[in-house]
Image: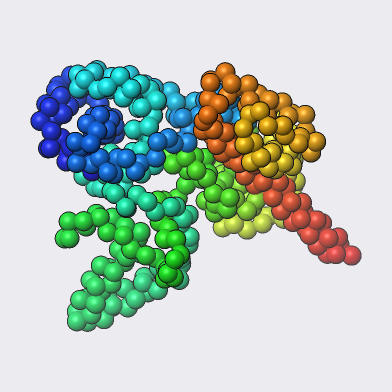
Amino acid sequence: MTKEILLLKDEKLSLSVNDYAHHSLSPTQILAVCLLYEMGKGKISWWHPYLMNLPRSYDILATFGEFEKQALQVDDAIWAAEKATLKAEYEWKEANALMKQLKLKPQLLTFKAWLWATATISSRTLHIPWDAAGCLCPVGDLFNYSAPGEEPSRCESMEHTMHDLVNEDTSGMADMEQLVSDSRRLTDGGFEKDVDAYCFYAKKSYKEGEQVLLSYGTYTNLELLEHYGFLLNENPNDKVFIPLEPEIYSSCSWPKESLFIHQNGKPSFALLSTLRLWATPQNQRRSVGHLVYSGLQLSIQNEMFILRWISKKCTTILKNLPTSFEDDSLLLSAIDKIQNLDAPLELNNVSSTCRDEICAFKANILQKGERSSMESKERWRLAVEWRLSYKKILVDCISYCDEIVSSLFHQNNSSQK
């Protein structure tokens, strides 16, 4: 399902969308309107069986209420959620004139309906080269996500093989072309013109009954939450950015987005290089720059200083957050035990801050009148899950830095004896 296909099949929709007054709408906005218009047709829509099997609600960041946004705790994450909501609201207002021109049913004109349509597009569309909005592909959108893993052996093998073929006689060129063609199979899927179909390829051997997973791309947990409405307990692409002083940024040429802490708690190559140079006296930086950018330690003292600095920075961030890593672990267990709002909960193990958060959640639900719906509970759980994974990276980073510092300290003492 693409906006082009829907426009071709419906003259009223096509005339309205192509009206000059709506030319400022983006491809995604137009697809969202087309999706709501198709929903409004009910059973007479050719897509009705597919539309009825789409989720009734989503948990992307734009759907988070004020309570769930604040539950993220980290300023960058809260701001990402606020931006997502503001963007969705702005685009909805922009598209409102077109939806009214199409005489959509009142329930399909609401912001809630718009969030549903845009979340469907954000979380379920597949890439096609000729339309930025993408396409909806029945069955193809059922695959769950698997974070992309590094497969250097396969890539290196192909690279070496291609190098060998290029350096042989021209009879090897046919083999190389076949190899290039086969390299597409290293990707999870894509639209292929030669067969006029969206094709998917397994990147591993699956056993019968095993779930087939696809990689949608490289995302942090916050990005997964923003675009797809879920996150991973173990996401190798997750990262934490710690605030750095302006003079640290100015001391290196690495882009800011490369200065982070990996999901396993280890500082990135660029972050370590930057801090090594920053911790060096300014009049000596030029002479050691080539060593820093090669990833080499400058001295034991320099390395111990920057690792202690990172550890202290992570500790400060954790202390400034309302709840601890341990608090959030217990809170997640408590959230899972909430079956209904009236049932009493055993809260002896959770901190007073977490008790207050549970009470605030209940008050928030009662205020919204959502006693029968626990959508807000799931979004709250996701917010707590996200902040827990964020804190775990910081906790692991502190452990990693302290362990290396201890090792360097003993190494330094041994060398002085």
Answer with left or right where residue 296 lies relative to residue 354: left
Relative to 192, is 183 above or below? below
Looking at the picture, tell me which residue is in the foreground, 45 or 310: 45
Percent of width and height locating residue 395: 71, 46
| Residue at the image position 69 percent from the left and 35 percent from the top | 317
Relative to 415, is 280 above or below? above
| Residue at the image position 25 percent from the left and 55 percent from the top | 198
| Residue at the image position 66 percent from the left and 56 percent from the top | 297
How many callouts does the rendering have?
Answer: 0
Percent of width and height locating residue 235: 54, 51
* Quarter occupied by residue 28: top left
Q: How is the image coloured?
A: rainbow
Looking at the picture, tell me which residue is in the foreground, 186 or 242: 186
Percent of width and height locating residue 92: 33, 23
* Quarter occupied by residue 196: bottom left
Name the quadrant of the C terminus: bottom right
Residue at far right of view: 417
Answer with left or right where residue 138 lies relative to residue 227: left
Looking at the picture, tell me which residue is in the foreground, 25 or 241: 25
Q: Is residue 276 visible?
A: no
Answer with left or right where residue 372 lies relative to residue 354: left
Looking at the picture, tell me which residue is in the foreground, 44 or 390: 44
| Residue at the image position 27 percent from the left and 43 percent from the top | 49
Q: Is residue 43 visible?
A: yes
Name the quadrant of the N terminus: top left
Percent of width and height locating residue 384: 62, 37
Answer with left or right where residue 326 lies relative to residue 22: right
